[in-house]
Amino acid sequence: MNPEVDTRHTSAVEVAIHALYRSMFPQGDREFVSRVFTWATACFTGTYHDYQPIDARYHDFEHTLQGALCFARLLHGRHCVRATPLLTQKAFELGLLAILLHDTGYLKHRGDDEGTGAKYTLVHVNRSAEFADELLSEKGFAPNEIQAVQNMIRCTGVNVDLTKIPFQNDLEKIVGFALGTSDLLGQMAARDYVDKLPILYSEFEESAQFNAGKGSATGMFKNSRDLMEKTSMFWEKYVLPKLNNDFQGVYRFLCAPYPDGPNSYLQRIERNLAVLRDRLAANK
C-alpha cells in the first residue's frame, strides 16, 4: 500500500517521486526530479518570467502535486510488473514534466488582473501545452520531446478525442493515459476533495461569466450543492468508464498486488463519496 505523503508540502512529494524514480532507474539522472520540481515551483509561485503566482483555488499547485504523486506511483507499479511496452527513463521523465505542467494554463501573465486563472478553464489545456512549449524550448528540449509532453497534457481534456492526439509511439500514448488517469484519481482521492467541491463550482462559475456562459460546465449545475449531489454520478458514469475504456484500465497498476489487489486510490475515493453522501444528508 502507498505510504501517506502530505501533498501540502512540495518537498514531501518531491522526495517520494525521487525515490520511485531511483527505484526504477538506479542509473538515472540523480538531479532530474529536483531540477524539474524547481522549474514547476517557479512557475506556480510567480518567479518564472512574467507569470503571476497561481490564483485558481481548486486547480492550485497542490492539485498538480496530487496528480504527480499518483502518476509516479502508477508508472512505478507498471514498471515493476514489466508491462509492455517497457517504460523507459526518458518516457518517465517527459511524463513527469507533462503532469507538472498540465495545469499551467491557469496561470496569468502580470497585468492580467481580471478575476482568477479559473476564467481560462475552457482553454486551459491548450494554454498548458503552449506553456510547456515555452518552458521546454528555453530549457533545450528537442521538438519531438516537447511534442510528447504536449500530447500527454492533451490527455487531460474533459471531452478530448484521444484518437486525434498525434502520439509518436505506443509508449508515449500509455504514459499519456497514465497522466489522464492520475489527474482524475489524484484529485478525487485527496483528503480535502469534498471540502473543495464548492470551490470547484466557483471556478466553473467564473469561467461561465468570463465566457458569457458558452460551453462552460457551470450550465450542468444549478449551484454548488447541485454539483456535490451529482459527484457520485460523475464518478460512476464519467470517470470509471473513462478510466476503464479510454485510458485502458492503467489505474490497475496502482493495485497491490497487481492486478486484483486493493487500490488505495479507489478506496480513498469511495470513502470521500461516502463522506459526501453523509454530509448532503445531514444538510438537507
Image (cartoon, rainbow, N blue to C red):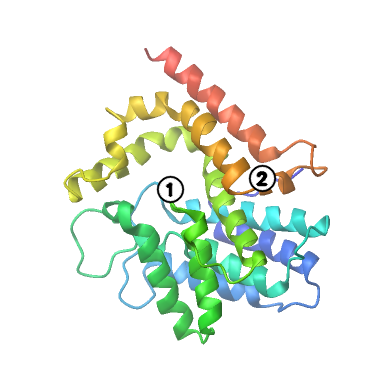
Q: Residues within 10 Å of mark 2 (few under 14, many from 20)?
A: some
Quarter of the rendering occupied by the C terminus: top left
Amino acid under disc 2 = Gly
Image coords of residue 87 (percent x, y): 73, 66
Image coords of residue 100 (percent x, y): 52, 63
Image coords of residue 109 (percent x, y): 27, 69
Q: Is residue 57 left or right of residue 87?
A: left
As helix, strand or loop, the secondary structure at mark 2 comes to: loop
Q: CA distance from mark 1 to mark 2?
A: 17 Å
Where does label 2 land, which residue? 249
Q: Nearer the viewer, residue 239 or 66?
A: 239
Residue 159 in view in this figure: yes
Q: Is residue 22 left or right of residue 228?
A: right
Kindly identify which numbered label has been placed on residue 158.
1
In the image, residue 195 sits, relative to residue 44, either above or below, namely above
Q: Nearer the viewer, residue 198 or 140?
A: 140
Image coords of residue 15 (percent x, y): 67, 62
Amino acid under disc 1 = Val
Q: Is residue 25 left or right of residue 178?
A: right
